[in-house]
Image: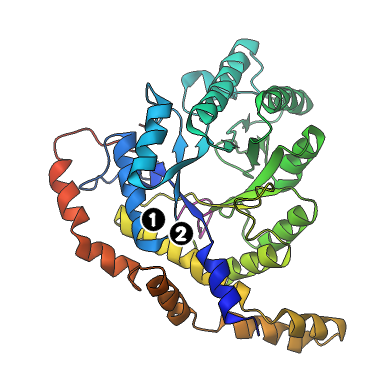
C-alpha cells in the first residue's frame, strides 16, 4: 500500500488550472441561460478563479481565451492576477468565431484567411510573453462537410506550415499544446481529428510541441487511458482538458459521466511519470479544466470539478504498484484487476479533508465557499453590466 505521507505530499503539490470561460454565461447552440453575478471583464473572471484556489488550495492558475479575454495591457492583467493570488495559465487561441473562417483558418484555401489566422496565433504568443504563460493551446475547427470540398492532403500541408511558424516563434521555456477533436463543426473530415494526427505534427516539430487530450473529444467507447499511456511513453502528453460527456464534447463537469474512467486515466498518468513534475525543467502534464457550467452555479461547479480530479488522483496514488506488478507478471487476471478496484473503491474523502485542514483550508471547500458570502457580494456588485459570456 502506498505511503500515506507520500500520497499527501503528492496531492499537496497538485495544480489544476481553471478556465476563464467557465465563469461567464455559456450554453448550447440552442440557448444561453444567464446567471446572476457572472463576470463582466477578464479581471472579474480572475477574481472568481481566485475564489476556487482560495478554497481548494490547488487551483493557482487561470487560462485565458483570446479574444474573449482581450485587454489593452496584458502585463497589467498578469499583475492583477498575482495580486488576486493566482497567475495566468495557458493562452487559448480562437480561430473559429469569425466569418472569414467558414472554410477553415490555417487550413483555409484562401491564403489571406490563413495569414489572418496565423497573425492571431502569433499575437497569442506575444500575450504569453507579456503574461509569463508557458503554454499556448491550439484547437482548430477546420475541416470539411462534403467529399471533394477541398484537398485533404493540401490542408495538412497548410496546417503543418502554420504550426512550424508558431513553433519557431516560441521561446525556450514555452510550448504549444495541440488539441484534437474527431468531429464538429466539420462533419465529413476534421483536419485534426485524433491523437495520431496531433502526435504526428508534434513529433515532426520537436519537444516544444505536445498533444493535449480533451477527455470529451472522443467517440463513445474510446480507451482514453491507452492514448494517455502511449503519449506519456513517447514524451508527448502535454496536458489535459478535463471535462465529461455523455454523447460528445458536452463539456460537463469532469468525472460526472464516468468517474471510473477518470481514475483509470489518472492511474496511467501516475504510472507513466506524468504527475508531480510541476516547477521542474520538465513542464510535465498540465491538468486543466475545460467546462461550461450552463445550468449549475459557476464557482461551485469549478470547485467540485477540482475536487473530482483530486479524488481520482488520490485513488491513483494509493494503487499498490508492487502488488499490481506481481499479479500482472504472474498472469493473475482477476488479482490484478482487484488491486485497481481496491484503490478505486477506497473512500479518499477523509484523506483529502485531513489534507485540507493541514493546509489551513476548510475540509469542505463547497460549503466554505457558500458560507463566505462571495456570491451574495458579486450578485449585487455585478448588476447592470454586460456579462462576458459565450462568444464574448
Measured as percent of width and height from the top left, residue 37 is found at: 21, 46
Measured as percent of width and height from the top left, residue 130 is found at: 49, 27
Answer few, some or many: residues within 10 Å of disc 1's Cα (few below 14, many 20 plus, some between 14 and 19): many
Measured as percent of width and height from the top left, residue 204 is found at: 81, 34
Classify mark 2: helix, strand or loop.
loop
State left or right for residue 17 relative to residue 321. left
Measured as percent of width and height from the top left, residue 195 is found at: 71, 47
Q: How many marks?
A: 2
Judge by depth and name the residue closer to the eye, 65 or 142.
Answer: 65
Classify mark 1: helix, strand or loop.
helix
The Cα–Cα distance between marks 2 and 1, rounded to whole angstroms, is 6 Å
Q: From what the image shows, is residue 245 above or below residue 351?
A: above
Does residue 255 appear in this view? no
Question: Which quarter of the rendering shows the N terminus?
Answer: bottom right
Q: How is the image coloured?
A: rainbow
Q: Residue at x 68, y 58 (%)?
A: 274
Q: Which mark is residue 53?
A: 1
Q: From what the image shows, is residue 319 above or below residue 277?
A: below
Answer few, some or many: residues within 10 Å of disc 2's Cα (few below 14, many 20 plus, some between 14 and 19): some
**Residue reaching furthest to the top:** 112
Q: Which residue is label 2 attached to?
A: 58
Judge by depth and name the residue closer to the eye, 117 or 370.
Answer: 370
What span is in magenta? 242-253
Q: Which mark is residue 123?
A: none
Question: Which quarter of the rendering shows the C terminus?
Answer: top left
Q: Residue at x 37, y 25 (%)?
A: 71
State left or right for residue 15 relative to residue 381. right
Does residue 117 appear in this view? yes
Residue 311 shown in magenta: no
* Residue 2 found in image quarter: bottom right
* Residue 52 found in image quarter: bottom left
Question: Do labels 2 and 1 touch, CB within 8 Å?
Answer: yes
Amino acid at each position: 500500500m502506498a505511503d500515506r505521507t507520500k500520497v499527501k505530499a503528492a496531492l499537496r503539490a497538485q495544480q489544476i488550472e481553471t478556465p476563464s470561460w467557465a465563469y461567464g454565461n455559456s450554453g448550447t447552440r440552442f440557448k444561453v441561460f444567464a446567471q446572476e453575478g457572472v463576470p463582466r471583464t477578464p479581471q472579474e473572471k480572475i477574481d472568481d478563479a481566485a475564489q476556487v484556489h482560495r478554497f481548494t488550495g490547488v487551483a493557482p492558475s487561470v487560462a485565458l481565451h483570446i479574444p474573449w479575454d482581450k485587454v489593452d495591457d496584458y502585463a497589467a492583467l498578469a499583475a492583477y492576477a498575482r495580486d488576486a493570488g493566482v497567475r495566468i495559465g495557458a493562452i487559448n487561441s480562437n480561430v473559429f468565431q469569425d466569418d472569414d473562417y467558414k472554410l477553415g483558418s490555417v487550413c483555409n484555401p484562401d491564403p489571406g484567411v490563413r495569414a489572418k489566422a496565423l497573425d492571431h496565433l502569433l499575437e497569442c504568443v506575444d500575450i504569453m510573453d507579456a503574461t509569463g504563460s508557458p503554454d499556448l493551446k491550439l484547437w482548430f475547427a477546420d475541416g470539411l462537410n462534403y467529399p471533394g470540398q477541398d484537398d485533404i492532403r493540401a490542408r495538412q500541408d497548410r496546417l503543418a506550415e502554420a504550426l512550424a511558424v508558431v513553433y519557431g516563434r516560441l521561446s525556450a521555456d514555452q510550448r504549444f499544446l495541440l488539441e484534437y477533436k474527431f468531429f464538429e463543426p466539420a462533419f465529413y473530415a476534421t483536419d485534426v481529428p485524433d491523437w495520431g494526427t496531433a502526435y504526428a505534427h508534434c513529433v515532426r516539430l520537436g519537444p516544444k510541441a505536445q498533444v493535449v487530450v480533451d477527455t470529451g473529444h472522443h467517440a463513445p467507447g474510446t480507451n482514453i487511458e491507452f492514448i494517455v499511456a502511449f503519449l506519456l511513453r513517447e514524451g508527448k502528453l502535454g496536458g489535459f482538458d478535463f471535462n465529461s460527456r455523455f454523447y460528445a464534447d458536452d463539456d460537463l463537469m469532469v468525472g460526472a459521466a464516468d468517474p471510473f474512467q477518470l481514475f483509470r486515466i489518472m492511474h496511467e498518468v501516475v504510472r507513466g511519470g506524468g504527475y508531480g513534475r510541476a516547477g521542474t525543467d520538465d513542464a510535465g502534464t498540465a491538468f486543466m479544466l475545460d467546462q461550461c457550467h450552463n445550468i449549475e452555479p459557476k464557482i461551485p461547479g469549478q470547485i467540485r470539478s477540482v475536487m473530482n480530479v483530486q479524488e481520482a488522483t488520490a485513488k491513483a496514488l494509493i494503487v499498490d504498484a508492487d502488488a499490481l506488478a506481481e499479479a500482472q507478471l504472474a498472469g493473475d487476471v482477476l488479482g490484478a484487476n482487484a488491486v485497481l478496484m481496491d484503490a478505486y473503491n477506497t473512500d479518499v474523502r477523509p484523506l483529502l479533508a485531513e489534507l485540507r485542514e493541514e493546509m489551513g483550508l476548510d475540509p469542505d471547500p463547497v460549503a466554505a465557499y457558500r458560507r463566505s458570502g462571495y456570491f451574495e457580494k458579486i450578485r449585487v456588485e455585478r448588476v447592470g453590466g454586460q456579462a462576458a459570456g459565450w462568444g464574448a
